[in-house]
Each structure stands twice: as C-alpha cells, then as structure tokens.
Amino acid sequence: MANLDDLLIKTSRTFALTIPLLPEPTRREVTIAYLLFRIADTFEDASHWARERRIEALQRFAELIENGDRPPAGTLGAAADWGAAEASAHQGYVELVSEIPAVLDAFAALSAPARRRIARHTARTARGMAGFVARTADDGTLALRDVPDLQAYCYVVAGIVGEMLTELFVLGRDELAPIAPYLVERAARFGEALQLVNILKDSADDAREGRRYLPPQVERAQVFALARRDLAASAEYVHALQRAGAPRGLVEFTALPVLLARATLDRVEGAGPGAKVSRPEVAAIVESMRRALDEKRPAIPA
C-alpha cells in the first residue's frame, strides 16, 4: 500500500486527503481505482500527443484493464512506451504512467467482485474519453456544443466514477442494501456536480490549453445553477448514507468533497475563474464536518 499511497499523494491533493478516510477494503479498492482513472485522464489531457495516439492509448488501456490477468499481446510494451513518451508535464502523472505494471499488479490482487466493477467502469470511461478526443480539432482544441453535450462529457469523466464508487460502497455492506437504488439514482449527478465545479473554477486555464468545456452560447449562470442542483442531490446521497448507518469513513469521504465544492462554487461565482478555497478554510470545513458527526448532526448542513 505504501507505493500506492505515494502515487496518490503525487497525483491528487483532494483524493490524497479523502481516500485515507475510507474503511478497508474500500480504501485500497478506491485507491487503485483512482490511479487507473487518473491514467486514463492523463492520456485524455495529453494535448501535445497526436489525436490518433491519444485515442489508441485510451482504447488499449481499456483493453488492458478488462484483461488484467491476461493482457493482450504487446499492451504491456505499449505501457512502457507511454511512460517513456511523457504524456504530461505533471511529473506525478508521468511517474504514475511509468508505474502502470505495478498498479495493475495491485489491481489483480483485489477481490474478484471489486475487480469486475472497477474494470467495467474504467473501461467505459477510457472509451468515452476516446470518443471526445476524436472530436478535437487538428490543433488539439475541444469545444462542447451545449448543456447536454457538457453533461455527456461530465458523465464520461466523472459520472461513471460516481457509479463505480457507489457499487464499491455497497459491496459487502448489508446495511446499505435498502438504500442502494437511492444512491445509484444520485451517483452520476454526484460526479457531475464535482466536475462542473472544477470546470467553472479552471475555465480560464483550460481555455489557454485548448479545452473549452463551457459552451460559448450558454450563460455561465445556467451552469452554476446546474452545479448547485447537482450538489443538492449529492447532499441527499450523503444524508442517506448517514441515516443508513454507513461507516463513518464513507460518510466523511462523500461529505467532504461536497462541502469543498460548495465553498469553491461560492468563491468562483463571486471572484471568477481561478478562485480557490484557502488551506485554513479547508481545515475549518474539515473540523466543522467532524464536529457535526461527533454530535450526530448531518455532515452537510441544509
């Protein structure tokens, strides 16, 4: 687990903060799933690669995940090539891609039910990303057309993650079986909410790199409203976990991103793209959430 945790810290600030909150075996399963999704995301964002190369990497990575115990001939060699080609300027992502064989070894050691769920959803995301990469212009730019197109993109890169996490949360936890349909109904919107907040926060930087996720004909106020509706559904998801007696770590893992996204959305709406919640504010949000749980109050206030 030590090497996986090191890769987690090098590739994510938010998930490095929240994944350790999870109980085992969910913590290990989600750590590995996060790293696999991050690899796919790195290929999608490799705008300095030719479009065809990014598509091929995503498609072959999907095959590799689906056949983790018997990878297609040449795919592990392709993994070595991906590492040598430096798919990102982010050194943590470069190191992660170079460690694909080690991540796959850890993935293969998971229980069969967890492995099946992670493989299916990771492959769906990788192939969905390949579809959006195929739409990029020759200069590498991607422009989304309208709100449904934006939602389709958010589903591929984040909504599917929400569905996968929900399946891992309920796996082996009989106390969550009665609320599983309720959680599944909100899982994709949970992922969409967090992705929309990131898109609004990073829109200026993304535009400079040729990624225009905010459709030009859509008022930003409409996207902010959609994000707030999705965050409300995400809060319902967390409240359902809490009422059902889910392990505290599951509640904290799901509540904290919603609280941080709420605060970030407020900040971006007031100060514009690039605005962030400060470290002291994050610490205060974490402390407030933990105090609420200690006192048996809802982790997310109304």
Image (tube, rainbow, N blue to C red):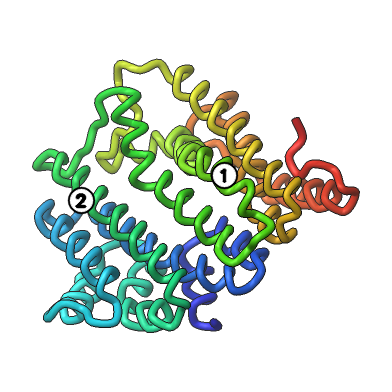
The residue positioned 43% from the left and 81% from the top of the image is 106
Q: Position of residue 211 (x, y in %)?
A: 28, 39
The residue positioned 28% from the left and 52% from the top of the image is 45
Q: Position of residue 59 (x, y in %)?
A: 18, 60
Hey, which quadrant is residue 16 in on the image? bottom right
Q: Is residue 238 left or right of residue 185?
A: right
Q: Compare residues 46 and 191 and report the one nearer the observer.
A: 191
Q: Position of residue 10 (x, y in %)?
A: 48, 69
Residue type at numbered disc 1: Leu
**What label does residue 302 carry, if any?**
none
The residue positioned 26% from the left and 59% from the top of the image is 43
* Mark 1, secondary structure of its residue: helix
Hey, which quadrant is residue 104 in on the image? bottom left
Which residue does the numbered mark 2 point to in the structure image?
Answer: 130
Q: Is residue 49 left or right of residue 89?
A: left
Q: Residues within 10 Å of mark 1 (few under 14, many from 20)?
A: many
Depth check, mark 2 against mark 1: the one in front is 1
Q: Compare residues 59 and 276 and report the one nearer the observer.
A: 59
**What label does residue 183 carry, if any?**
1
Q: Position of residue 212 (x, y in %)?
A: 29, 33
